[in-house]
Amino acid sequence: MSLLPKPFSALVIGSSGTIGSHFVQLLENNPSCSRVIGIHRNSDHAIDYRRPETIAASANSLTELGPFQLIINTVGVLHSEQWMPEKKLDDLNPSQLAEMFNTNTIGPALTIRYFSKLLDPKHGVMATLSAKVGSIEDNRLGGWYSYRASKAALNMVIKTASIEFARTKPNIALIALHPGTVNSGLSQPFRGQQIGRDPLEAVNDMFHVLENVNKEDSGSFLTYAGEKLPW
Ligand SMILES: NC(=O)c1ccc[n+]([C@@H]2O[C@H](COP(=O)([O-])OP(=O)(O)OC[C@H]3O[C@@H](n4cnc5c(N)ncnc54)[C@H](OP(=O)(O)O)[C@@H]3O)[C@@H](O)[C@H]2O)c1
């Protein structure tokens, strides 16, 4: 049975990004969505993973606007002005590794900690955007060390939290979601414009998956098409 009631209230974290902003657009146009709030580094209820204290503060500031039945965290980083994904071991450096783990693992983990308290205990879904390249089993090409490792670690946090939630919040599903290659700033240096899908199409597909998530799916790594990925 779906964990998303009608109507439902939604929160999108990272709504300044391509996938985040398209989720907000999609939900604003969904008649079953009674309210959608988008937050990012420069919004009201700002959340900035470089300032970890903002995570709890942002969640606390949203308490009165909750509960939410759907929370989607779309924050993530793959490259910066200083570095691109590593192709070989000799490219590894501490600042890139630290930044990738901070944004792709530590921030999202603390977001699950604090924002899951805003979920409706009766029924709800919390999805965090991961990436198929974070699958250890699926890793055939190598490279992209820190991105892969930070998403693999994120996946472990989601899986572990889902086991705790089965006891403490049995009507909440925690999901790791792979969006596919989407045309965005994140994918742009990697031919995202040519090979990436239209973001609205991608969020439509992902929302369809989230609408159909049930309790048994909690702790799964799902693609935009609803397929289960190996961890
Ligand atoms: N696009 C793809 O092909 C693809 C494929 C697989 C997985 N994903 C995953 O999907 C998610 C969304 O990607 P996207 O394509 O929409 O990327 P995007 O357009 O670059 O958006 C990234 C979002 O993350 C936020 N962000 C980055 N660093 C942050 C920090 N330190 N603190 C708080 N927010 C921060 C950005 O905020 P600012 O606007 O303030 O920078 C923005 O809202 C990511 O987790 C990504 O790993 C994407």
Image (tube, rainbow, N blue to C red):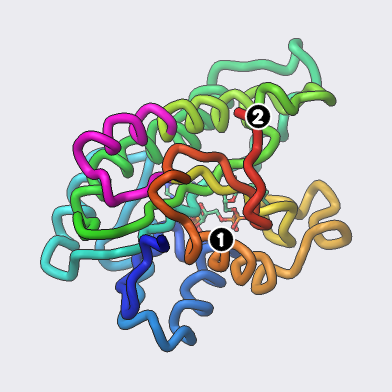
The quadrant of the picture occupied by the C terminus is: top right
In the image, residue 113 above or below residue 129: above
The quadrant of the picture occupied by the N terminus is: bottom left
Residues 230 and 13: in front is 230
Residues 50 and 110: in front is 110
Residue 153: in magenta span: no
Q: Quadrant of residue 18?
A: bottom right
Q: Position of residue 117 (x, y in %)?
A: 19, 49
Residues 21 and 113: in front is 113
Q: Amino acid at mark 2?
A: Ser
Residue highlighted by disc 2: 135
Q: What residue lies at 34% left-to-right and 30% top-to-bottom?
A: 163
**Residue 16 in view, yes or no:** no
Q: What residue lies at 32% left-to-right and 52% top-to-bottom?
A: 47
- The local secondary structure at tag 2 comes to loop
Q: Position of residue 30 (x, y in %)?
A: 46, 84
In the rendered structure, the answer to whether residue 105 lies left or right of residue 8 reads right
Residue highlighted by disc 1: 209
